[in-house]
Image (tube, grey):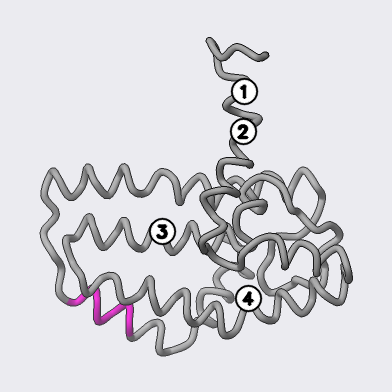
Amino acid sequence: MDLETWQTIVRLPAVQWVQALAVQRRRGTPTRASATAAAVLAVPPAVVGLEPLVRFRRTGTTWHPHRPDEASALVTTGANAVTRNPMYVGLAGLLVAHAVHRRSVRALLPAALFVVSLDRGQVRREEEALAAAFGQEWEDYRDRVPRWVDARTPALVRKALAPLVGRLPGRHRG
């Protein structure tokens, strides 16, 4: 890891460090079933969280959460067509999978607090920067795609996956 990444980790609020330590203090013992369930649950959030990194790189825009004002393009396709925060949704999903792996309801607390703290702080700063940079394009995107997930999400997922499903072997067009 580079110095900037370590500085970002160290800047996490003390409350989040305490939460993480409290949850880790008492470990649940994973079973084969909980490990399998966690592995299955971890795949979609990992894909949802990583896919935008590739798309941001191809677009030539920043993905760095502390530099939203450096965004050179508004990415609205792929996972970003389903949620405005796919990387954060992916991380929250991995925290949930971790709780399942450990068989610990208490381990769900960091996932909830992670989302709340992001929603109240980082995401709002990012959205302000994107609104300033992209104006009406941002407003249209904001109105069309939920910040996290909501009742629109299933339809948005179907729409985002439709081009992929149409290219599957054995699928006939017409």
In the rendered structure, which segment of residues is drawn in magenta?
19-25
Query: Given the image, on which type of amino acid does mark 4 rest?
Result: Val
- Crowd tier of the residue under label 4, counting other residues whose Cα lies within 10 Å: few below 14, some 14–19, many 20 or above: many
> Label 2, label 4: how many angstroms apart (C-alpha)?
28 Å
Label tally:
4
Query: The residue tagged with tag 1: helix, strand or loop?
Result: helix
Q: Nearer the viewer, mark 1 or mark 4?
A: 1
> Label 3, label 4: how many angstroms apart (C-alpha)?
17 Å
Marks 2 and 1 in Cβ contact (< 8 Å): yes
Identify the mark nearer the N-term, 2 or 4. Answer: 4
> Label 1, label 4: how many angstroms apart (C-alpha)?
34 Å
- Report the side of 1 relative to 25 (left or right): right
- Crowd tier of the residue under label 3, counting other residues whose Cα lies within 10 Å: few below 14, some 14–19, many 20 or above: many
> Label 3, label 1: how many angstroms apart (C-alpha)?
27 Å
Query: The residue tagged with tag 4: helix, strand or loop?
Result: helix
Q: Which residue is mark 1?
A: 166
Looking at the figure, which quarter contains the N terminus? bottom right
